[in-house]
Amino acid sequence: MSDQDRHAPAPLIVSDMDGTLLDHHSYDYTAALPALRRLRSAGIPLVLNTSKTVPETALWHARLELDAPYVVENGAALLGADGALLQAWGRPRAELLAVLRDLRGRMGWRFESFDDLGVAGVQQHTGLSAEAARQALARGWSEPLRWLDGDDAIHEFKALLERHDLQLLRGGRFFHVQGRHDKATPLPALRAMLDRPLLVALGDGQNDAAMLAAADVAVRVRSPVHPLPDIGAHARVIDTASMGPAGWAEAIQQLFAQGLLRGGVDDE
Ligand SMILES: [Mg+2]
């Protein structure tokens, strides 16, 4: 090992899941496997940073055989590799539901949140199995909802949520009510905890933009359904040529080839 190698900052990988490490449509990740194995053999931690819930993410954490902490519900909380809650930045779901109940009562707006829908309703609107719907309902710090009222009312709804220090985000199928956190919120705690100064982040969507902007190396993974996220000016950006997990693997292998990531066995 050269002096330069010895003093190169130790890297940490933080990655979005849906559309990035997992295929947008099928959740397949076969194309990412060689790069995943290489990270593991190089001892480089891979931290999942997703909008998924704790049970949903824990399932993937086990399936991908990871041993790093992970971040759930858009930066709401950081969990250890063993699933223990380490730190939460999100507002507890019970508080969110109380605000929603109060607004519905006072304003008479029509909307259905996951709490209103229950397992059968979530299944009906997502196509998830009963077990997967239960995992999607096991939320700690955010509440998805279907807005059934007018476009004007939603602006007022958003403004009133902001008075409660909450934000309303537009997702694919649902709006999401949550506290003022995003996928970048847990990054300082992660850097300090793992003592890995070089942070490489990978993501495909606009909800990854803050995380990508805060990383030392930002990898924008191409998506079949939307443009690359806008992250503003950044010193070091990689835009993948391939989509989803193939793009994810392409970027990781490129970082090994450039010497930014080191070690491990390339079994591709
Ligand atoms: Mg994504």
Image: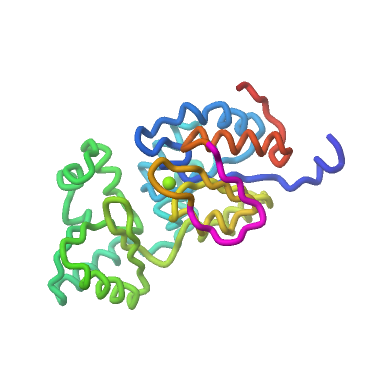
Q: Position of residue 221 (x, y in %)?
A: 51, 43
Residue drawn at point x = 60 percent, y = 40 percent = 45
**How does the figure colour the protein chain or chains?**
rainbow
Compared to residue 112, the image places residue 126 above or below, namely above
Compared to residue 259, the image places residue 215 above or below, namely below
Dividing the picture into quarters, in which one does residue 96 lie? bottom left
Q: Residue furthest right?
A: 3
Residue 80 in sight from this viewpoint = no
Compared to residue 37, the image places residue 163 above or below, namely below
Compared to residue 21, the image places residue 103 above or below, namely below
Q: Position of residue 16 (x, y in %)?
A: 47, 46
Report the label total: 0
Residue 7 highlighted magenta (yes or no):
no
Residue drawn at point x = 48 percent, y = 53 percent = 229
In the picture, measured across the screen, residue 127 lies left or right of residue 75, that is left
Q: Position of residue 259 (x, y in %)?
A: 73, 38
Residue 230 highlighted magenta (yes or no):
yes
Dominant SS type (magenta): loop
Residue 32 in sight from this viewpoint = yes
In the picture, measured across the screen, residue 235 lies left or right of residue 56, that is right
Nearer the observer, 81 or 33 = 33
Q: Bounds of the magenta span?
A: 229-241
Residue drawn at point x = 38 percent, y = 39 percent = 24
Q: Position of residue 235 (x, y in %)?
A: 66, 56
